[in-house]
Image (cartoon, rainbow, N blue to C red):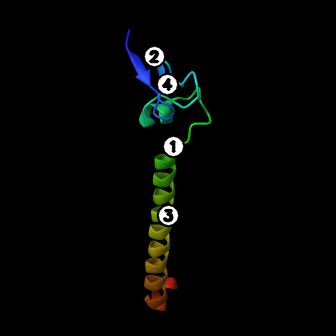
Amino acid sequence: MSETKCPNCGESNPENAQVCQKCGTSLLDEVEACLDISNPDTSCQTTEKDSKRVLLLSIVIIVILLLIITSILSFAPSAYWG
């Protein structure tokens, strides 16, 4: 039977252990820890950063589109507006 060493304290743990028996540190890979729904305390900082970047990029694109539309409408001849 293979054992897994804790990256925090060096304690040997069973291969299928999810947390260290001595200190409680997660023994899962970072990706597995992010996907582990049963452990809500696990933080997925990479995912949070990506979400913030997507949100910020979306807001910037919307603002740019609004500026383009506003400038087109402000310079359009009034004949279009009746």
Q: Nearer the viewer, mark 1 or mark 3?
A: 1
Tell me the residue that label 3 is attached to: 56
Residue furthest to the front:
10
Q: Which of marks 1 and 4 is in front?
A: 4
Q: Callout 4: 10 Å neighbours few (<14), some, many (20+)?
A: some
How far apart are labels 1 and 2 at the CA level?
Answer: 22 Å
- Of residues 27 and 82, the one nearer the viewer is 27
Residue furthest to the top:
1
How far apart are labels 3 and 2 at the CA level?
Answer: 40 Å
Tell me the residue that label 2 is attached to: 16
Tell me the residue that label 1 is attached to: 44
Q: Mark 3 belongs to which amino acid?
A: Leu
Q: Mark 1 belongs to which amino acid?
A: Cys
The image's mark for residue 53 is: none
In the rendered view, tell whether residue 75 sits above or below residue 66: below
In the rendered view, tell whether residue 72 sits above or below residue 58: below
Residue under the image location 45 percent in, 75 percent down: 64
Identify the element where label 2 is drawn. Answer: loop
- Of residues 22 and 55, the one nearer the viewer is 22
Identify the element where label 3 is drawn. Answer: helix
Tell me the residue that label 4 is attached to: 11
Q: In the image, residue 12 lies at what x, y percent? A: 46, 20
N-terminal label among 3 and 2: 2
Circles 3 and 4, Cβ within 8 Å, touching? The answer is: no
N-terminal label among 1 and 2: 2
Q: Mark 4 belongs to which amino acid?
A: Glu
How far apart are labels 1 and 3 at the CA level?
Answer: 19 Å
Q: In the image, residue 79 lies at what x, y percent? A: 46, 89
